[in-house]
Amino acid sequence: MRAYPLIAALGLAALAAQPVLAQEKPPAVEAPAKGSEKAAKADAPDLAQASAEEDAQPRRGSVTVGGKVIGYTVTPGTVVIRNDDGEAVASMFYVAYVADRPKGSAPRPVTFTYNGGPGSSSMWLHMGSIGPVHVETPLVEVAAPAPYKITENHETMLDKTDIVFIDAIGTGLSRPIGKSKGPEFYGVDQDIDAFARGVMRYLTINDRWDSPKFLFGESYGTLRSAGLVHALQERGVQVNGVVLLSSILNYGIRQPGFDQIFVTYLPSYAATAWYHNRLQNRPAALEPFLTEVREWARGPYATAMAKGSDLSDAERSAIAKQMSAYTGLSEKFLLSVDLRVELGRFRKELLRDQSRTVGRLDSRFKGIDVDDGGDGPEFDATDTSISGAYIGALNKYLFGTLGYKTKLSYRPNYYAQIGGGKWDQKHRAPGGRGGGAQMALADTALDLSMAMRQNPKLKVLSQNGYYDMATPFFGAEYDLKHMQIDPSLQKNLTYKYYESGHMVYINPAVTTQFKKDLDAFYDSATQGN
């Protein structure tokens, strides 16, 4: 969906033992000779493994958009990616939606889309966002148990672009093959290289090199997209547009000891306090309130943070007073944490007097802990509210409705192997002062900057949820506004905001505007095609 753990991986159902019936004695079977190839196969574990043969299992479907019926072919399948020596190293799973088009008409755009984690499959975007089907989820409450309602998505982008949902290696149905074991794909640069190879392979086997091309990433998928667009252009794949949904582009500013992350979170804290009616003088609307908070955060608050221990008691008290007015937290609490409110503490403290916590992925959601005394919430109320519906719907749709055949189990995530510090977060950014960049914590905003400078027609859309606490909108603004692109390229960068969380599309109240903003972006990025 990401740079955070979202849901527990699906377990395999246990098979019930079958009773032995009293029947006639079966014929004797001669045991294979010890050490023979047949014996070795008999002793080998029965493990489901991905195939080195590419797969495609197309089905037909239709969806109504704006009163018009669009026929399409949906294809679950795989592409095999190979290393520079031509060896097959991974099988990459995708589900592609290709709309019917009149013979001889211009090539349609194609959008490659994926979630993040790192370690998340594309399940969230696939079953909730721009595809022609989606699962219905509730408004800020726990989703009902099965059966889940999968319906046509009348806000799909299929009227503007064909869509290819891709699972990262290790997630969904994507797997390492051959001599590969997996860890060689689990890092920023390794992942970008794998996606570049997968995208190019899809273009080749589906004759899509002449199509306008878009990348659509969510969460860590935005960090991937910012690096991937440059990697593709370096390999000759010109991209028309990049959609960044709920962005995190720079790992560096999140290191312990740096204060920028506290500045980054402040407008999201204010939006959350506004939503839950925790402000004494609550404005009527989020904007221009949040514009005011932004200015104070990067002005007086950032200046106070920069002073460190040189901040006087009078200055400290003044900052705490204004910060309390913006966040709904008490001055006493703010002074007790040295004006630096970690995310977990905010989520626990804001509604502590109501015995409630707020969600990380979407702070509109509320959770209930075992007690009110902890420093942080026991769980993310957003995750626990909707993950069951998405997991159930994905499996029902892929293996039931589409009838996809495979021995593999779909992994909604693979955090057990990829998360917990196992992901290589280092990245070598392109160019830079002094003739080249060194390996450092990833900041792929630098890659996106290079891509935009090399391709002045490249368009970028940044979409953000006000209640997203995982990748706060002010952080996206900071990263994108520090790309140092020429003023003539600023017009190619657009920002849009929604009263929703990390997965913007789960709020039905904003999906129409979400679609309109995407429509305008695609029209702009394909002008002249």
Image (cartoon, rainbow, N blue to C red):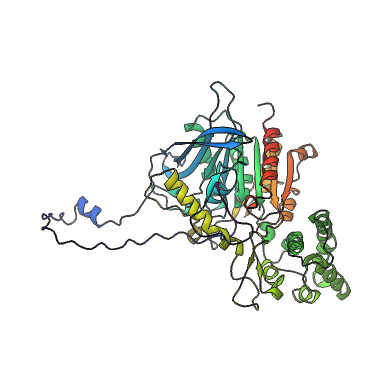
Q: Residue 100: x and y, percent?
A: 53, 29
Q: Quadrant of residue 234?
A: top right
Task: Write the start and end of the magenta stretch as one range.
Answer: 134-138
Relative to 13, 481 lies left or right: right
Q: Nearer the viewer, residue 5 or 502?
A: 502
Q: Residue 160: x and y, percent?
A: 62, 34
Residue extending farthest to the right is: 314
Relative to 484, 385 lies left or right: left
Q: Nearer the viewer, residue 375 or 484?
A: 375
Residue drawn at 28 percent across, 63 percent down: 17
Residue drawn at 61 percent across, 43 percent down: 216
Is the residue 147 above or below the residue 488 in the image? below
Residue drawn at 31 percent across, 55 percent down: 46
Query: Is residue 121 shown in magenta?
Result: no
Is the residue 8 above or below the residue 60 in the image? below
Residue extending farthest to the top is: 104
One can see residue 346 in this view:
yes
Q: Quadrant of residue 79?
A: top left
Relative to 300, 237 lies left or right: left
